[in-house]
Image: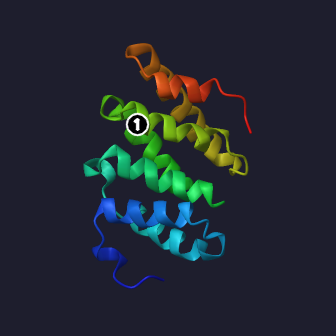
Amino acid sequence: TMQGVSDYSPQSLANVAWACAKLRLEDRTDVLQALVDEATKRDLHSWKPQSLVTLLWAAVDLGLRPGRLLEAVSSQAQTRGHAFNDMDLAQLVPVLTSGGWETNDRANLQLLHATIEAQIKRRPLPRTNAMLNMPPR
């Protein structure tokens, strides 16, 4: 485990996760798992959407499928959808299209997708709309 991770701010947790993903540290998923575990212990209602989204995106990008974090982000997106900007929602699209999720995570993936679609209908989200309409890699 990572020492001191409990002292990290939400943004710090997200920043370290983002750096791991950008540096392609696939052999250090233990670091990412420690960040995810710490995040899921906290009250995520006060987190900025960007920090939530970045942490989830980074974990998924490096091959983790953190179901509890997905559930938390899906819930936050549904209740605070207006607080998620175009970049936040667009960054969630690769999470939706990544495979390997557990069967019991499908409901949260569907909820997240429906929430994103609902936000697209409420306000202009060109980046998110473009990401949803891109062919998968």
**Count of number-bearing discs:** 1
> Closer to the camera, 87 or 95?
87
Query: Residue 125: where, in percent of width, then height?
Result: 43, 22
Considering every residue shown, the one lying at the far top of the view is 121
Residue at 32% across, 28% down: 82
* Disc 1 residue type (three-letter): Ala
Identify the residue under disc 1.
77
Residue at 37% across, 16% down: 123
Residue at 33% across, 53% down: 44
Q: Is residue 133 above or below residue 103?
A: above
> Which of the 4 image quadrants contains residue 62?
bottom right
> Closer to the camera, 132 or 7?
132
Query: Residue 136: where, in percent of width, then height?
Result: 73, 35
Residue at 44% across, 45% down: 73
> Which of the 4 image quadrants contains residue 132?
top right
Considering every residue shown, the one lying at the far left of the view is 46
Q: What's the image's color scheme?
A: rainbow
Q: Is residue 129 above or below residue 39?
A: above
Query: Residue 84: where, in percent of width, then height?
Result: 36, 35
Is 134 positioned to the left or the right of 117 in the image? right
> Closer to the camera, 88 or 102?
88
Is 3 positioned to the left or the right of 133 in the image? left
- Secondary structure at badge 1 equals helix
> Which of the 4 image quadrants contains residue 10?
bottom left
Q: Is residue 23 above or below residue 58?
A: below
Label 1 environment density (alpha carbons within 10 Å; few <14, some 14–19, many ≥20)? many
Query: Residue 111: where, in percent of width, then height?
Result: 53, 33
Q: Is residue 57 above or below residue 15?
A: above
Quadrant where the C terminus lies?
Answer: top right
